[in-house]
Amino acid sequence: MFMLLNNTGMRFDFITELLGLQGFSVYHAIIKENILHLYLEREELPICPQCGSIFSGEIKDTYEQCVEDLSVFGKRCYIIFDKVRFDCQCSYAGNELIPWLCPYARYTIRFTKWIYAFCKRMAGIDVARIFGISKHAVYRLDKAGIEEELSQQEPIKPSMLSIDEISRKKGHRYATIISAPRERKIVEVIKDRKKAGLNAFFKTKGKVWCSRILIVTMDAWKAFRTSVSEFCQNAAICFDHFHLAQHFSKAIDKIRNHEAHKASKKDKEVYVGKRWLLLRKPENLDEDQKKELNSLLDLNKNIARVYILRDEFREIFYGFSVRSRLIRLANWMKKCSTLHLKPLTDFVKMIRRQLPYVKNSLRNNVSNGFAEGLNNKIRVIQRMAYGYKDFDYLRLKIIQQFNFRSIKSLFDP
């Protein structure tokens, strides 16, 4: 069923003012079921998108265009108008500039801003269902919105970087996250964790930018270390103690398994299921868990000694001065050597191989904690979209969620 409205039945001045479509006015409207069509007529001469001048010459041709605007009163709204093509004196040949319309898109700028705002907090597939457009159109509009907002951001000039990797696909496919912990922002997301990708990033930033970097925290991945050493020559490379603690936890579990194999059949049950009790902080254990842990420590002296070393290892990084932290590390490694347990000895050897970088971490009292904390949020971003086939889009979404924290109301000027 059609409802036809024209200037004889009502005036469209109010609708024209409400829409704010520069250079055009509404002269006709048709409502069919849940769709509203608004017809526009031109009030101003076309504008050249290249030189910005008003074109008053001979128009090459015109064609009718239909674009979608925001829905109104539960009805989808489409705007229909004549668009012109012309040859300007500035050598431009093509379509006119329409300020309220996205170039090469069938949506108004107002419509795309709402799509972008929804995509900041919702999955793209859900936004597509709400607005009744394809998910590919939503992804395209969201990506364009992020790129536009990214271009308006002030450049990040950090003195400290954190480098970490995160799995982006199954099959050991990783991305490298470069962040600025002090500014609490993402600097870049690189498609892999190879040296070539990091080198390209530092080359793009330039020598002056790289010379400002004084501290870089990372894990023991060689590609990170060699690239930073080459480009950020003023930076102290600091190995993250969270990764060291992770390796130490594996050493503790190997010792537990080894001791369990040597135990009698009667005592084997005491070792079963105690892995997390050994690795968890004592203050996080309830009374029953503490009893189970104490029964294991009373039964095996080697595990009890390693458990004490585990607490002392944590205390290394909480020393009140640089000297105290370095002394604690040296004393701790000596204690480990006296136990003659192979997993523990291998762990100490690993620390000795990386000792300059571990000491840098103690001297500067830094860790990769901020970068590690990013991983959980990045995984949520990936799960919301059920994964990203387009890495560039994933990169932009990560930067958006961490760097564009201030979300303005759509009604703000």
Image: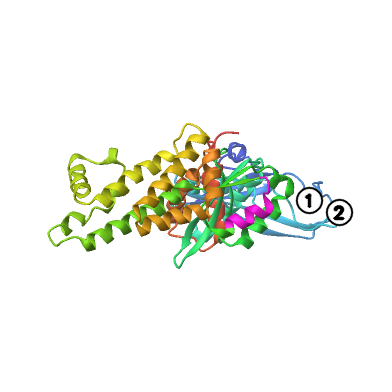
Q: Is residue 404 magenta?
A: no
Residue tagged by mark 2?
Answer: 90
Residue at left offset 24%, top offset 52% = 274
Say which label, 2 or 1, has the lower sequence index: 1
Residue 323 shown left or right of residue 270 in the figure: right
**Foreground: 154 or 124?**
154
Does residue 104 appear in the picture of this structure? no
| Quadrant of residue 345 within the rendered picture | bottom left
Across and down, in percent, residue 399 comes to: 56, 48
Q: Which residues are magenta?
A: 224-234
Across and down, in percent, residue 228 comes to: 63, 53
* Local SS, label 2: loop
Residue type, numbered disc 2: Cys
Q: CA distance from mark 2 to mark 1?
A: 9 Å
**Answer yes or no: do the residues labelled 2 and 1 have beta carbons within 8 Å?**
yes
Residue 382 shown left or right of residue 56 in the figure: left
Locate the C terminus and report the quarter of the image it occupies.
top right
* Local SS, label 1: loop
Across and down, in percent, residue 107 comes to: 59, 52
User: Could you classify mark 1 by the number of other residues whose Cα lies within 10 Å: few (under 14), some (14-19), or many (20 or more)?
Assistant: many
Q: Residue furthest front?
A: 338
| Quadrant of residue 103 within the rendered picture | bottom right
**Foreground: 105 or 44?**
105
